[in-house]
Image (tube, rainbow, N blue to C red):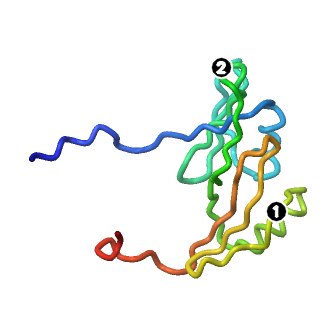
Amino acid sequence: MATPTPLVTGTDFITISTRDFDAAAEFYGNVLGLPLSKRWGQMPAGEFETGNLTLAVMQSDAFGLEFRANNHPIELRVDDVQAARAELESRGVDFKPDTLDSGVCHQAFFEDPDGNALAIHHRYAPAAPAAERP
C-alpha cells in the first residue's frame, strides 16, 4: 500500500479558552512575559509567542463557544525550572505541588487565571533515539 502524501505540514497555533481576554492578555503578556504578536482585529483574542509554538488566547463567548478550561498542561520550555519558578512566584503565580523530577525532566505545574493547566518544563536528559522509541 502506498503512503499518501502528508496533508498536515505543521501546527500554526493552539487555542486557549478564556472568559476575559484582557485578564488573560495581562497574564500571558506581563506575568509570563510572552510577546503579543497579533490581535484578532476588534475581537477579544490574540496570539502570544513561545519561541516554537503560538498560543492563541481567545474569549470563548465572543466566538459563540462555551468556555472550558484545559486540564492537561501546556508545557512551556525554560532553561532552569527552579529559577523560572521562583521568578514566576514573585509575579504571583501559584504553583501546584512540588517540582516534579521524572528522571529525564523537571516540571512545575500552575494555572492561568481561567484555570487552564500550564507547566514550565526542562528536559535535562537526551531523548531516546528514534529507533528506540515505541
What count of labels does the image hold? Answer: 2
Q: Residue furthest left?
A: 1
Q: Amino acid at mark 2?
A: Phe
Q: Amino acid at mark 1?
A: Phe
Residue drawn at x 32%, y 71% is 130
Point out residue 94 in the picture as x, y percentages from the top left corner.
86, 59
Q: Nearer the viewer, residue 38 or 63?
A: 63
- In the picture, the disc for residue 63 is 2
Point out residue 80 in the picture as x, y percentages from the top left corner.
69, 73
Left or right: residue 104 compared with residue 41: left
Q: Nearer the viewer, residue 61 or 120?
A: 61
- In which quadrant is the C terminus drawn? bottom left
Residue drawn at x 71%, y 40% is 69
Residue 87 higher or lower than 129, as above or below: above
- Residue denoted by label 1: 95
Q: Secondary structure at mark 1?
A: loop
Q: Nearer the viewer, residue 81 or 72?
A: 72
Residue 119 higher or lower than 15, as above or below: below
Q: Quadrant of residue 56?
A: top right
Residue drawn at x 58%, y 44% is 54
